[in-house]
Image (cartoon, rainbow, N blue to C red):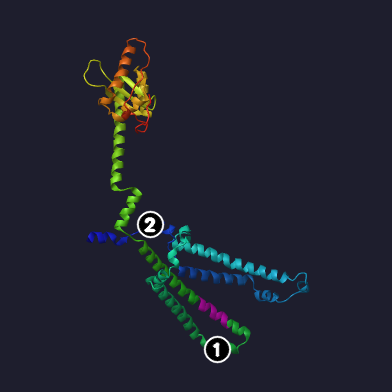
Amino acid sequence: MAEEQDSQEKTEEPTQRKIDKSIEDGQFLTSKEMFVFTSIFIGLFTLVFISSLFPNFMSAWKSFFIFSSEELDYQKPYLGILKFIRIIVILTLLIGFPLLITSIITQFCVGGGIYFSPKALHFKGNKINPLTGLKRMFSMQSLIELTKSILKVSLLGGIAGIIIYFDLMNIINLSDRSLSQALKGYVILFPKLTIYLLIALAVIAIIDFIWQKHSHNEKLKMSIKEIKDEMKETDGSPEVKQKIRKLQNEISQRASEQSSALGDVKDASVIITNPTHFAVALKYEVGEEGAPVILAMGRGLMAEKIINLAKEKNINIFGSPLLARALYFTGKIGKEISEDLYASVATILAYIFKIEKGEILEKPQIEIPYDLQFDEYGNKKTGGES
């Protein structure tokens, strides 16, 4: 019982298949706080860069509210609007494109790539279930996210409050200064506040990334039983693998026996062929007790070798597809042929011996028992064939 409980505990690191499956289901590593930090950082940097490109931005903004006589003409009331839209589009592209690239790079760095999961877009009925929604609202994950949000707001608000507190007298006295002096004061305060807040966001982002990576890994962890089940699905059960290995060994051993037996083809009395896919070399001495013995046999390339050796040694070759397959699938090298094939082989041997004596005979029709009729794959045939 204790071993069964241990096998159910999720203590093992996830396999690559489990990781790939979680990505297919839309569950991959990401960090919202890291996106917030990189987006704000690049956004501010882009704004500073754009402001350096448009030093007279206020003049350009003022031009929106100054209309020439041509623009006031009833025939062209849209020129000012087009100018405004053009500048807005340019600013949007200048700001939006860097943010898009930043988001892609951030996901690559955090999650190892950009993933698209069609399964995540499928409709799920439990998403609109009120009970399921309440469970999500009051779950441990929701509590952790709420705690993170409170801590983040408290940290950023605290840092901003401290900085403003130390510059509070300067801020209060800004109203007593000229516009240029007040702007200079803001120019000093704003970068300082921005830098400290960015540092705080960076720390929050790093902590969130570490936490998300840990929680994501814990969620994907597997039990020993799950790993064993997965191995059975991918590689097959141990029983099946054992059968496959046994079959491979048998095939290898049979191929080795067939190769070794090629040297005995010269002693064969007849070669039964299919006519080229299968070849079986049989030996039988007239007057000896016992049935014909299989000296060599093979299919494909091995059959071609047997047939070529038979031609070199002037050994008789007899074509009988059904008999060749029956001998191949029921016999073994060095063993006598099956009892049920005695009559068929005897008919061929009698024909061969008479031909060798100079008699002229028609090729006999060979009958094969129905239950010994095979196709080229070793399956029992459903119809007769000569």
What residue is pinned by disc 1?
Answer: 172
Say which label, 2 or 1, has the lower sequence index.
Answer: 2
Of the pair 177 and 159, the residue shown nearer to us: 159
At 60% from the left and 66% from the top, the residue drawn is 93
Direction from residue 70 to residue 113 in the image, left or right:
left
Indicate the position of residue 169 as horizontal and vertical percent values.
52, 88
* Label 1 neighbour load within 10 Å: few <14, some 14-19, many 20+: few
Residue 337 visible from this viewpoint = no
Residue at the image position 42 percent from the left and 77 percent from the top: 151
Helix, strand or loop for the magenta stretch, by majority = helix
Amino acid type assigned to the residue bearing label 1 in the image: Ile
| x, y percent for residue 81 | 70, 71
Work out whether residue 102 can be spotted.
yes
In this view, the residue farthest toward the top is 358
Image quadrant holding the N terminus, namely bottom left
Q: Position of residue 140 (x, y in %)?
A: 37, 71
- The quarter of the displayed image where residue 378 is located: top left
Residue at numbered disc 2: 18
Residue at 60% over, 82% down: 183
Point out the image quarter for the C terminus: top left
Q: Residues at badges 2 and 1 in contact (C-beta under 8 Å)?
A: no
Left or right? Give the position of 186 relative to 263.
right
Q: Residues within 10 Å of mark 2 (few under 14, many from 20)?
A: some
Q: How many marks?
A: 2
Residue 384 lies, in percent from the top left, at 37, 27
Look at the image and give the residue range highlighted in magenta.
185-194
The front one of 128 and 235 is 128
| Residue 11 quadrant | bottom left
Q: CA distance from mark 2 to mark 1?
A: 60 Å
